[in-house]
Image (cartoon, rainbow, N blue to C red):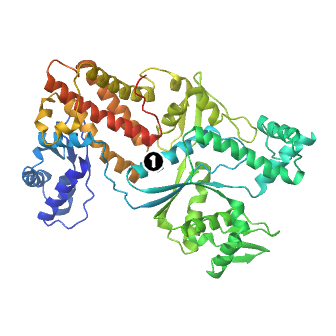
Amino acid sequence: MLKDASKIIEKILGELKITDDIRYTVEIPPQAFDADVSTNVAILLSKIIKKNPKEIADEIIEKIKKEEIVADAKFQSGFINIIYSDNYIYSNLIKSMHSLHSGILNGKKILIEFVSANPTGPLHIGHGRGAAYGDSIARLFEFLGAEVEREYYINDVGNQMELLSGSVQAYIEKKSLPENGYKGKYIEDIANEVQSSEFRVQSSEIKEYTINKILEWIKNDLEQFGVHFNNWFRESLLYKKNEVNGIIQKLEEKNVAYQKDGAVWFKSTDFSDDKDRVLVREDGRKTYLASDIAYHFNKYQRNFDEYIDIWGADHHGYVERMKGAVKAVGCDDKKLKIILYQLVNIIKDGKKVNMSTRSGEFITLKEVINEVGVDATRFFLLMRNSESHLDFDLDLAKKQAPENPVFYVQYGHARICSIFKEAEKRDKRLEIRELEGREKKLQLLKLKEERELIKKVLYFDDLLGIAARDYAPHYLTKYLQDIASCFHSYYNRNRVITENTDKTFARLAMCQAVKNVIKDGLNILGVSAPEKM
C-alpha cells in the first residue's frame, strides 16, 4: 500500500519538475482520518517553492485523482489523504491470500554474528534476547529473499578461559577459587563430572573439557530455542592459522599500528577513539582487540554484502573502535552494521529478580523456556526495541488469557483455523482459484471494520520492508498484536459463516488473508502458529 502511494507521488513530482530531494513520508493515517494512506509532501514542498501548502496540495490531488487505483484524495491537517479504489483493495486482498512477499532482498548475501557468549557458563536470559533478536532478523531477511548465514564466534582464548579452568580445578582440588574466579553450581557439576568420568582428564585437558561441556549446553539450549547456526567459529582457529599475527603485520604495514613501551598499539585515535589501544602486551600476549580485528578481516574475505554484529550493550565503547579497525585494514566499514541490545529484567511475583553472572546467580535461558515455553520467551524478548531495557514478566507470559500478547496473537490464528473447519463441515469451502479475476465477489465486504482489517493485511508487505530497513523485529510483534485485536473485535461482532453463500465466501477470503500474515509474522519471529488452542 505505501509503496504504491510512493510511486504515485514520485511520478507527480517528476511531472512538476521537482528535482530537490524531498524526504516526505507515506504512512497509514490514524483511524480518525477517513483515508488509506497519508503523505506530508505538500507541507515539505511549500518550504522549497515558497507557496501555500493548500495550493500545492490541490495541484497534487488533482493529479492523484487521475490514477486508476485511487478513489479520492483530500487535504486535511497538513496531509494529503488518499483513499484507494475498491478494485485496488480487493485485487490486492486476493494476492495476500497466496502468502506472497516482495523479495526486495533477492540476491543479497548477509552474515549475522550473534549470541557469541563466552563459554564461561550456561546462557542467561540476556543472551536469550540476543539469540531471539539475531535469529528473527535472519528470518526476516530470508523471508525477503536474502541468503543469510548465522555465525557464533567462540572466545576460547585468553584470561577468562584460564579463570574458568582454574575455577573447575579449584573445586576438584578443594582449594580456594582464583581471584575473580567463576562460582555457581554449574562449575561444581563440571568438576564432579571430570572426577567421575570413565577416562582420566589430565590437568592440561581441563580447560578444553570445560569449554566443550559448556558449549554443549549452549548448543542444546539454542537448538531448543529454535536457533541454528551455520558456523561455530573458534577464536583459537585464528591463532592456529597465524591470522592474528598476520593482521598485526598488516596494520603495521599500513602505518596504523606502532610499537611503544614494549607493546604494539593500534592507532585507534585516527578513527574517532579517545585513545590508542594495545594489540600486543609487553609480555607478548595478544589482546582481544587483535583477534577481533583478525576475525572481522576473516569475515570480509568471505564476500558478503553486509556483515551484522549483534552485541550486548556493555560493548558500546567497542563499536566505533571496531568500525575503525575494519576501515584500517582496507575493508568497507559501511558494510559492517553493529547492533546493541540492552539487558533483560526478569519480573516474578511483581518483583525484579537480581542477577549476577560472575557469582553464578542468574536466570538461565533454559529455566525461562522450561517455565513459559519457547513461543512466549521469544515473543516477549522481541516486544521492544533492542536498545531499550526490557522487563520480562514471567507470570504474564504463562497466562492463557487475552492480556498475554503471544497467546492473543496465536489464538487469532487458531480461531481462523477453527472457522475453516466449521465451514468445511457446512460445505462452505473456500477455493482461492475461484477468486482470480472476480474481485466483485469481495465487494460484499462493505463494513468499515472489514476494510480496516483488509488494510492491515495489505500493510504487511510494507511493514516487512520497514522492519528490515530498521533492523526492528519489534515492529512485527506490535503489528501482530494490532491485527489480532482487529480480527478478534470483528469476529466478536460478526458471523463469518452466514446463510448468504457469497458473503460467507468473501469473509472466508478475508480470514484466509489474515491467517496468512499472522502465520508468516509469527514464523519470522520464530514463534509457532497453532491450529487449535
Q: Which residue has dot 1 on it?
A: 139
Q: Nearer the viewer, residue 220 or 130?
A: 220
Element carrying mark 1: helix
User: Image check: 382 left or right of 363?
Assistant: left
User: Whole-percent x and y of residue 83?
Assistant: 14, 42
User: Whole-percent x and y of residue 44?
Assistant: 22, 56
User: Whole-percent x and y of residue 340?
Assistant: 54, 50
Residue type (three-letter) at the residue carrying disc 1: Arg
User: Image check: 241 left or right of 41?
Assistant: right
Marker count (numbered): 1
Residue 190 visible in the current orientation: yes
Residue at image x 73%, y 46%? 120
Residue 417 vertical placement versus 344 (above, below): above
Label 1 packing within 10 angstroms: few (<14), some (14-19), many (20+): some
| Quadrant where the image shows the C terminus | top left
Residue 85 visible in the current orientation: no
User: Whole-percent x and y of residue 513?
Assistant: 27, 36
Residue 491 quadrant? top left
Residue 304 vertical placement versus 380 (above, below): below
